[in-house]
Structures are given as structure tokens and as C-alpha cells.
Amino acid sequence: MQHQVVSRDEWIAARKAHLAREKEFTRQRDALSAERRALPWVKVDKGYVFEGAKGRQTLADLFGANSQLVIYHFMFGPGWKEGCPGCSFLADHFDGPNQHLKHHDVSLVAVSHAPYAEFQPFRKRMGWQFDWVSSAGSDFNADFHVSPSPREKAAGRYEYNYEMHDGEGGEMPGFSIFYRNDTGEIFHTYSTYARGGDLLIGAYNFLDMMPKGRNEDAIMDWMRHHDRYEEKPEARARIMPVGAVASCCG
């Protein structure tokens, strides 16, 4: 790497100027988060049913004792042997925060389109502890636009990230947030897709502070399932094919 090298005094002056920009960004992010929380809600009246470790569960069951529910739409389709590498990268960040979220009125659950039994070997391999259920047989994935509906497939046009796309589509990632009030009514409050979950990837926040940054030519082109790294990996060596991961978070 070639980079400008200056005296300590010059570095402090540049760092203070950048700090002012960082503080401005923090205030803007706080304002954006407040605007997000102020968005209107939609009441959920449809009776979605999921399959998990506790058998058949409703959307209300996924809340547990909490009033807030965050669902990660995890890309694991019927017949798959492994989960999407990008989704897996993000899911590696769930268990740590979840030790605290579940004690602060938030339940975190991953939902995949494949039957429940199909992703259990992969879950065991990854060592994850968060709740992960199947939406197989329900309209949940189609209604939240992370799997194309039969009608969309037939039409060759599907919705994702609030836009229409040509083609049959496939499994896609995202987060959906729900609230349950004291009378048991459930409301959909927010969904985000594609790079909308980028902020929750803690490894990226570390990389963004590093001299080389994310050091990738395409989104997540260097990343693998966490048990697929070599014992002594060389930087930027043997990167994954872009098509293996870039499609899920581009």
C-alpha cells in the first residue's frame, strides 16, 4: 500500500476534522433510526404456521414472552445442503447479541423456506444456538417477498427490495420486524433487504476501520462458511466465486 505519511501534529489535525464528520454521521443515523421507528404499521391477520424444535408454531409463538420480534429471512431453499454463505456470515453475528436481546424484550428467529429437517445438519455443523424455523407450506416467504410466489414464477417477474425484477427469482435475504401489543395483536413494523442488513455484520464494522477496508472486489467475494477457512489463510487467497455470495446481499 502507498499512502500519505505526515507528522503526528498533521495527523491529529486531519483526525479531528474527520471526527467532526463522524459525529455528524452519528447524529444523522440517530435521526434516521427515529424516522424508522415512526413509520406506520400494518396489522398481521394471516395465520402463518412454522415448524421448529417445538413443533408447529404460529407467528405469535415466535415472540415467546417478548413483545418485539426480529426475523431474519435466511436463504436455505428446499433441497439445499448448505445455507447461503452470505446469510451464514451474517448469522455468525446472531448468538452474541442474542444473549442480550432476549433479555430486553426482543426475540430473534431465523426463518427459511426449506423443510425444518433439511437444515438441521447444517445448523449443527455451524454450531448456532439461535432459533431457526421453517416456513415450508405457508405463504410467509412469498408475502414478505423473499421467495417468489407461484404467480410471480409463472409471470417471470417478482418483487424484491420494493422493486420489480425480471426472471423467476429465488431465495433472497432480509429482516422483518414485528410488534405484539398487550391484547395479542401483531403488527409488521419494518422490513429491509439486500444491503439493509449490512450494519448488523460486525466483522464489516471492524474491516471498515482497517487500512485496507473491506478489501473486496464484489460484496463478500472473500468470505466463506466459517469452517471452510484454511488453518493459515493467505490474504486474498482462493476467493470464492462471486456468484456464490454476491447475489444475496448486493
Image (cartoon, rainbow, N blue to C red):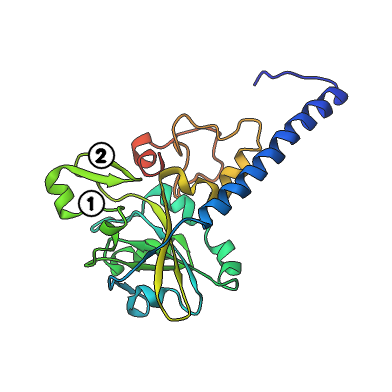
Q: Residue 148, labelled with which disc?
A: 1
Q: Residue 33, labelled with which disc?
A: none
What is the spatial separation of the Cα atoms under label 2 and label 1, in whole angstroms?
11 Å
Q: Is residue 227 visible?
A: no
Residue kind at label 1, given as amino acid type: Pro
Where residue 198 appears, x then y in whole percent? Answer: 50, 45
Is residue 9 depicted above or below 166 in this figure?
A: above
- The first of marks 2 and 1 along the sequence is 1
Q: Is residue 80 visible?
A: yes
Is residue 124 depicted above or below 224 in this figure?
A: below
Where residue 7 appears, x then y in whole percent? Answer: 85, 21
**Would residue 201 be found to the left or right of residue 62 on screen?**
right
For image coordinates 45% across by 36% down, the residue present is: 219
Q: How many marks?
A: 2
Density class for disc 1 (Cα within 10 Å; few <14, some 14-19, many ≥20) is many
Q: Looking at the rendering, in which quadrant would you find the C terminus?
A: top left
Where residue 172 appears, x then y in whole percent? Answer: 33, 49
Q: Which residue is mark 2?
A: 165
Q: Secondary structure at mark 2?
A: strand
Residue 8, image quadrant:
top right
**Would residue 182 be found to the left or right of residue 55 on screen?**
right
Decide which of 205, 240 is in the foreground and name it: 205
Decide which of 33, 140 is in the foreground and name it: 33
Is residue 66 depicted above or below 15 in this figure?
A: below
Residue furthest toward the right?
9
